[in-house]
Image (cartoon, helix red, strand yellow):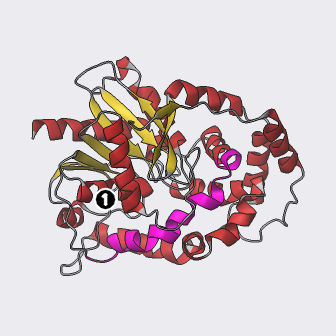
């Protein structure tokens, strides 16, 4: 019997909405910070909390339903995904993977533009899965769901949907999962679209001024802003108890990264942030999502800090946004990705490029598709 793909509709009970508002209103606020570098500020948090009380989650559900939700069982887990099939037969299948603290909602504005015939984009079939343990995908009940196992599940998903080959892209965890797809299934991956590619610094040559500046920024980020990653990688269940029980605690944990990792010139809109945090809250996926760090962050960190022998030979398009870290140079990326067909350095944008700069994000995806077709 062929695997079943089941349409999915998200419906949070009214009681859950009321409980969230009750918890927000009853939050015990900490004393105001004594220095601006101590984390997300009390002023910022109180403003977000007040907005959250009136946030329209039902509108998010309506949008998700219109985007085309479904689930299918792969490797013992029900995987949730969005599937937007173009009416154009020549459309390119594009598999996009989100990261943390994101979700399928990261691609909300991308989907809206791809669906608009006036946008002038090449036709695309979009497949956007929720990572295991995120959103409406099942959470693994055992260890072992690393980026490579997820990549194999994604390849199975694309086959079930009738796509024998496809473009794979994303950012954050999506960069790593997509890279693994290129390594494991080079005959099926038409191209990668990496935002940004993960590549190690060149150590046998003098760095350029830009490379040196980027490396210094990354060292500073690791010195002052990497505690969350160490907690996720070593004690995800401990922090998970708090994130699963306090909506304001969850909001602070995620909002800090949305605020710090976005380009300050193109911040993530408050309602986009609250939609994402609400999805984590209602699906109780905060504790299960961060376990991916336990599974894979050591290897992924090595990919952009130390030389690696696993060269990626499929055609690759890259977009390196100016406020992103890591931010490799093209010559660094070329040592690992041997067939770069497009290289873009947009003027604005940071870690959440699909939310911050969806037009630029799609322009470089389109350029990758066109360069691959031409080559």
User: Which residue: 29% across, 71% down?
Assistant: 200
Q: Does the magenta stretch include residue 293?
A: yes
Which quadrant would residue 303 be assigned to in this image?
Answer: bottom left
Residue 368 rendering spot, x and y as whole percentages: 23, 41
Which quadrant would the C terminus be assigned to in this image?
top left
Does the magenta portion include 264?
no
Name above or below for residue 207 compared with residue 276: below
Q: Residue at x 48, y 49 (%)?
A: 352
The count of marks equals 1
- Residue 113 in percent (x, y) is at 42, 27
Q: What stretch is highlighted in magenta?
A: 280-307
- In the figure, residue 332 lies in which quadrant? bottom left
Which residue is located at x 38 percent, y 33 percent?
126
- As drawn, is 366 to the left or to the right of 260? left
The x, y position of residue 48, in whole percent, is: 73, 47
Most frequent secondary structure within the magenta stretch: helix
Q: In this view, does 210 lie above or below 182?
A: below
- As drawn, the residue found furthest toward the left would be 375
Q: In this view, does 59 lie to the left or right of 181?
A: right
Report the quarter where the N terminus lies: top left
Residue at 19% x, 65% y is 311
Residue sitting farthest toward the bottom: 204
Q: Is residue 191 above or below residue 144?
A: above
Q: Count neighbours of disc 1 (C-alpha within 10 A) and say few if under 14, some if 14 to 19, many if 20 or more.
A: many
Which residue is tagged 1?
A: 180
């Amino acid at each position: 019997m062929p695997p079943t793909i089941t349409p999915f509709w998200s419906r949070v009970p009214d009681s859950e909405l009321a409980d969230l508002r009750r918890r927000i209103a009853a939050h015990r606020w900490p004393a105001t910070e004594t220095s601006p570098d101590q984390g997300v500020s009390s002023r910022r948090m109180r403003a977000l909390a007040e907005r959250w009380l009136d946030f329209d989650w039902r509108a998010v559900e309506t949008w998700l339903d219109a985007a085309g939700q479904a689930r299918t069982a792969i490797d013992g887990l029900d995987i949730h995904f969005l599937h937007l099939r173009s009416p154009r037969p020549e459309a390119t299948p594009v598999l996009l993977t989100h990261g943390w603290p994101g979700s399928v909602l990261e691609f909300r504005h991308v989907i809206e533009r791809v669906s608009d015939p006036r946008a002038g984009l090449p036709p695309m079939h979009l497949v956007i899965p929720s990572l295991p343990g995120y959103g409406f995908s099942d959470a693994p009940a055992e260890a072992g769901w690393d980026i490579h196992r997820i990549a194999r599940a994604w390849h199975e998903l694309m086959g079930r949907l009738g796509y024998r080959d496809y473009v794979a892209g994303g950012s954050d965890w999506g960069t790593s999962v997509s890279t693994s797809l290129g390594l494991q299934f080079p005959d099926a991956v038409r191209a990668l679209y990496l935002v940004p590619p993960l590549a190690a610094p060149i150590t046998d040559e003098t760095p350029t001024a830009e490379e040196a500046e980027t490396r210094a920024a990354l060292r500073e980020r690791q010195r002052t802003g990497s505690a969350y990653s160490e907690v996720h990688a070593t004690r995800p269940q401990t922090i998970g108890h708090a994130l699963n029980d306090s909506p304001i605690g969850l909001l602070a944990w995620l909002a800090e990264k949305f605020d710090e990792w976005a380009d300050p010139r193109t911040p993530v809109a408050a309602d986009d942030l609250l939609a994402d945090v609400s999805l984590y809250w209602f699906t109780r996926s905060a504790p299960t999502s961060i376990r991916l760090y336990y599974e894979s962050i050591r290897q992924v960190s090595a990919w952009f800090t130390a030389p690696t022998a696993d060269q990626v030979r499929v055609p690759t398009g890259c977009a390196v946004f100016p406020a992103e870290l890591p931010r490799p140079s093209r010559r660094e990326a070329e040592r690992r990705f041997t067939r770069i067909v497009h290289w873009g350095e947009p003027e604005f944008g940071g870690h959440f490029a699909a939310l911050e700069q969806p037009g630029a994000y799609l322009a470089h995806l389109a350029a990758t598709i066109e360069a691959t077709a031409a080559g």
